[in-house]
Amino acid sequence: MLKKILIIALFVPLLQGCTVHKFQKSKSLDGGYAVARFGYVIPEYTADLNKKAPKDLKLAKERYLRRKWIVENYYIQMGKIDTYFRRFVGRYPPLISSLAGNVFKTPFNIVSEYRYDHNEAYRQRIDKADAMQKAKEDARNKMIMEKLYEFIRQDLQKETQNPR
């Protein structure tokens, strides 16, 4: 038991540092510096409320270091990025169980697809349920983004009060 705990204790710090954050000039952010996490640009790391990233690399790095954990937390809540554990470890058990479960779900999926293609009432019911689910998710994501922009607004106020 102690051996397992020690192994886990050794791997947790290793997995926490397995990210690649890259500073790059972004045309969509007015030519300023943006940060990409695994190739996915997250403008809130460095940009202000007007979607303009700083042209000064030093300022971009300072903003990134202040905002990194909070911005990632909001993006994880929205489902736009995965946690480091899920990205490297937690993704595989659900994938394997999904492959095994699809053997039993396939006949039901075939019937559902057939009904969707040939039954107008069923199609409308499924489309309505999908639209309601998407509307709920969009409202939830909008609320989370508002909280994120409030954090950025406060961060920019602190930045102007305490210039370098």
Image (tube, rainbow, N blue to C red):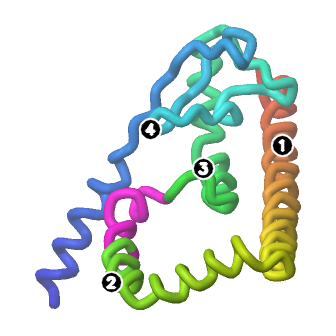
Which of the two discs, 4 and 1, labels the residue nearer the N terminus?
Answer: 4
Q: Quadrant of residue 57?
A: top right
Q: Is residue 162 above or below residue 116?
A: above
Q: Marks 4 and 1, Cα distance to the nearest angstrom? A: 23 Å
Amino acid found under the numbered disc labelled 4: Phe
Provide the residue span drawn in magenta: 83-94
Label 1 residue SS: helix
Amino acid found under the numbered disc labelled 2: Ala
Image spot of residue 130 (x, y percent)? 78, 70
Residue labelled with disc 4: 38
Q: Quadrant of residue 65?
A: top right
Amino acid found under the numbered disc labelled 3: Glu
Residue labelled with disc 2: 100
Mark 3 vs 1: CB contact within 8 A: no
Single out the residue that lies furthest toward the front: 118
Label 2 residue SS: helix
Which of the two discs, 2 and 1, labels the residue nearer the N terminus?
Answer: 2
Q: Marks 4 and 2, Cα distance to the nearest angstrom? A: 29 Å
Label 3 residue SS: helix
Residue labelled with disc 3: 72
Image spot of residue 150 (x, y percent)? 87, 46
Q: Marks 3 and 1, Cα distance to the nearest angstrom? A: 13 Å
Of marks 4 and 1, the one in the foreground: 4
Which of the two discs, 4 and 3, labels the residue nearer the N terminus?
Answer: 4
Is residue 56 rendered to the left or right of residue 150? left
Amino acid found under the numbered disc labelled 1: Tyr
Which of the two discs, 3 and 2, labels the residue nearer the N terminus?
Answer: 3
Tell me the quarter of the image containing the N terminus.
bottom left
**Residue shown at 62%/75% (left/top)?**
113
Is residue 131 within the magenta segment? no
Residue 60 circle label = none
Residue labelled with disc 1: 149
